[in-house]
Image (cartoon, rainbow, N blue to C red):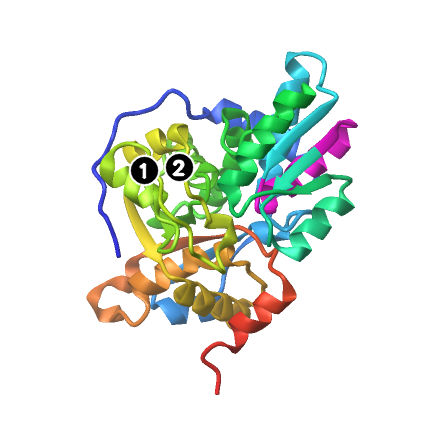
Amino acid sequence: MTHPLPAGPALSALPTLADIEAASKVVYADFPATPQYRWPLLGERLGTECWLKHENHTPVGAFKIRGGLTYFDQLARRGPLPREVISATRGNHGQSMGWAARRHGVACTIVVPHGNSVEKNAAMRALGVQLIEHGDDFQEAREHAMQLAQERGAHMVPSFHADLLRGVATYWWEFLRAVPQMDVAYVPIGQGSGACAAIAAKRALGHPVRIVGVVSAHATTYADSIAAGSVVEAPVTTVLADGMACRVADAGALDILKAHLDDLVQVTDAEVADAMRALFVDTHNVAEGAGAAALAAAMQRHAGTDRSAGSSRTCIGLALTGGNVDASAFARALQQGQP
């Protein structure tokens, strides 16, 4: 299901080219630019030129680490660092916070909902995170984290913030410079930093690419909120795309997305599972549910199209945003639909 969106005005909250270039120096102190490849089998599957950005190749297996590094860098520039940071996550944001907090010698507490990914939880603990399980979904975990931060006098790190955005934008800055001919980019939306970062990099570079946001059909707060023009809470029932399992859209992210997204696509868990399998078959990369959502949307739009109709002239960019999926969940996704 798709929802074309009208164009909107520029928003000054987005990082500039100078901001993104400065952020890249912070990021590259910990790891180099991630690769993007034109995978032939993906191109055959979609009937067009297709590039895949491998954010699953960062030290925490997801793009979020970039935002954590720049968030802490900006904190340090403003004054003494807090003794403790607290945040909430379904996994990748928490690993980002854990990595950056450890780098700066700051205690880090992360709240996750009950039933969170076992392997993401283990990865956070390995980074020195104090992990707390609370609530049935991300929103309940987030509200508990805010309460804990107030009680402890700790610094609460939100899931969407300008200082996170400037770091996340570096991966789209890398991607768009590497593929100047890109016509359309698909990016999953969880709390919105990835899609907003794509918009920021596009504007900073003056790149003509169309940005298509991807949401789970089982977590539609951003789709519903964009349609309504204000934040609309929506139930979350996805069991596979935990990185997109957001019940309440962030108002700041929504303002940017509703003004600047070119289109929006909803993908089901079944489509995400198909995309996870396709990524493994075509590239032998492991993608978590949210990490495969961009391909799921591209398959919904492009797979099976007739090259003679002009689809081969479209250059597609896909963000493989993370590969942190529990082995059992990945095995089930690979087995679905098999004889």
Relative to residue 288, is residue 75 depicted above or below?
Answer: above
Q: What residue type is labelled 2?
A: Ala
Q: In which quarter of the image is residue 205?
A: top left
Residues drawn in magenta = 89-108
Is most of the magenta stretch helix, strand or loop? Answer: helix
Is residue 157 at least partly visible in the picture? no
| Residue 97 forms part of the magenta stretch | yes
Is residue 147 at least partly visible in the picture? yes
Tell me which residue sits at (52%, 70%) in the image: 333
For the residue pair 267 and 122, the one nearer the viewer reads as 122
Residue indicated by mark 1: 232
Relative to residue 113, is residue 10 depicted above or below?
Answer: above
Residue indicated by mark 2: 249
Horizontal side of 301 relative to 188 (left or right) equals left
Horizontal side of 80 relative to 157 (left or right) equals right
Q: Position of residue 313 (x, y in %)?
A: 29, 59
Tell me which residue sits at (50%, 58%) in the image: 289
Horizontal side of 237 relative to 22 (left or right) equals left
